Amino acid sequence: MSLTNIDIKKAVVLLLLLSASFSLYAQNFRELKIYVPPVAGEGAQEDNAYFYGRLSYEVAFQQHSIVRALRGSDFTLRGSIMTLEEMLSVTAGNSYSFYDARNEGKEAVQAQRAAEQRQGYTGEAFVFNVELLNSATGEVKGDQYIIYNWLDSYVDGFLSTIVYNMLSGIPDIEIVDDWRDRWLFLEASVLWAPRIYKGLYESVSWANFGLRVAAEFHFLNFLSLDVGASLVQDWVVVSAAPKQEYRDLILEAPAALKVVLKPLNYLMLEPYAGISINRSLFNYTKPSTLSWFVGTQLGIKAGPGMVVIDPRFAMDFSKSSVGSVQYQRYMIQIGIGYKFGFFRKKTKADY
C-alpha cells in the first residue's frame, strides 16, 4: 500500500493537533487571587459598604478568587471615595493623579459640574476611584474612577465595566508544580555493597548485594532527614589456609541528614552524612553496632518520581568479630532505585 501526498498531509495535521492538545493539558492554570480592602474615604451614607460589596461581587462574578488578606493575594483592588471638590483641588504630583492617568484635564470635569448646576442639581457630587495593584510590589496596574451624585443602576454598570477592564488584561497565572517540592519521599533500591575486611588476614568481598527501603522528610527546602532499613550480605574470610569464610545477613538502620540541591529542573542532588545501627540476623558474625557513612544521592526525573543513584562510603566505629578474630570493615555501597514524593509543599504562588 502506498501513501499519497494527501494522506501524508492528513497525518501531519493530525500529529500537530495531538501535540497541541498535549501542550494544553500540560499547562495548569489557576484563578487570580484578589484582595479587596475596605473602601477608604467618606461618601454619602452607606456608600462605602455599597462599593465594597459591589467590588467583591464583580471579582467573584468574573470567576476570580477573593482572599481575606493582602499576603495571600496576587492583586489588590482598592477603592476610595472623595468629593468632587476634593478631587478638583488635587494637583499633579500629589497622592492622586487622575488627569495624567486618563489624559483628561480639570477643565473637562469642571465643565461637567457646571452643566449639572445649570440643570438645577446643587447636591454634593462624589468620586469613586478604583485602583488595581500588584500585591507583591505595590505597582499600580490600573486606575479608573466614577463621578456620581447618587447610587443607581448606571453606577452599577460603570463599576462592572471598570472591574472587567482591569482584570481582563491580567494574564492567567500558571501553577508551577515542582516535582521536588514535596514533604515526604519514599524510596526502594537494590544495592551493590563491596566490602574490605582488615584484621590478621585481609579480604575483599565484591559479591555483596542488598535491598534498601527509606523515607525522607524535607523539613526545610534545603535540608532533609532520611531514615531507612537495609538488608546487606556480609562475606568475611578470616584465613586462607585453611580457608575460613563466614556469610551473614546484616540488618542496617541508617539515618542521615541531607543537603537538598535542585540544579536544573530535572535533577535533585543530595550530599549527606549519617550513622547506621547494625545487627546480624543469623549471628554468624558480630558486626560493629554503629557505623558512620557519607555519600551523595543523585535523583533524575522519571515519570511521577525519580530514578536515584546513591554511592556512599561507610566505616565502623569499632571492630567487628567472628569468634575471637577481630577485623575492621570498610564498606562501599552503590544503590540504584526509585523515589516518589508525596504531599506537595505550598509555594508563594499558593498564598
Image (tube, rainbow, N blue to C red):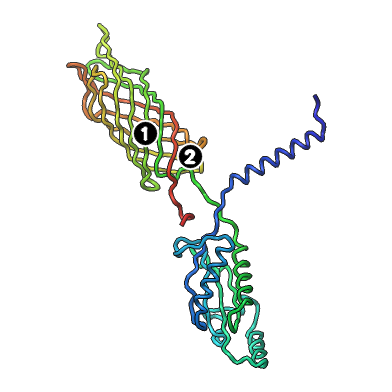
Q: Is residue 196 above or below residue 14?
A: above
Measuring from the top left, give residue 50's x and y in whole percent.
52, 75
Q: CA distance from mark 1 to mark 2?
A: 19 Å
**Residue reaching furthest left?**
324
Specify whether 316 is left or right of 99.
left
**Residue reaching furthest top?**
242
Amino acid type at image mark 1: Ala
**Residue reaching furthest front?**
153
Measuring from the top left, give residue 151's x and y in whole percent.
58, 80
- The residue that mark 2 highlights is 267
Q: Secondary structure at mark 2?
A: strand
Residue 130: image quadrant is: bottom right
- The residue that mark 1 highlights is 214
Q: Is residue 108 above or below residue 312?
A: below
Specify whether 320 is left or right of 350.
left
Q: Residues within 10 Å of mark 1 (few under 14, many from 20)?
A: some
Amino acid type at image mark 2: Leu
Q: Residue at x 53, y 82 (%)?
A: 82
In terms of depth relative to the viewer, which is nearer, 249 or 61? 61
Measuring from the top left, give residue 241's x and y in whole percent.
25, 7
Q: Residue at x 50, y 47 (%)?
A: 177
Q: Residue at x 66, y 88 (%)?
A: 111
Measuring from the top left, give residue 206's x and y in whole percent.
37, 18
In terms of depth relative to the viewer, which is nearer, 128 or 208? 128
* Labels 1 and 2 touching (C-beta < 8 A): no
Q: Nearer the viewer, mark 1 or mark 2?
A: 1
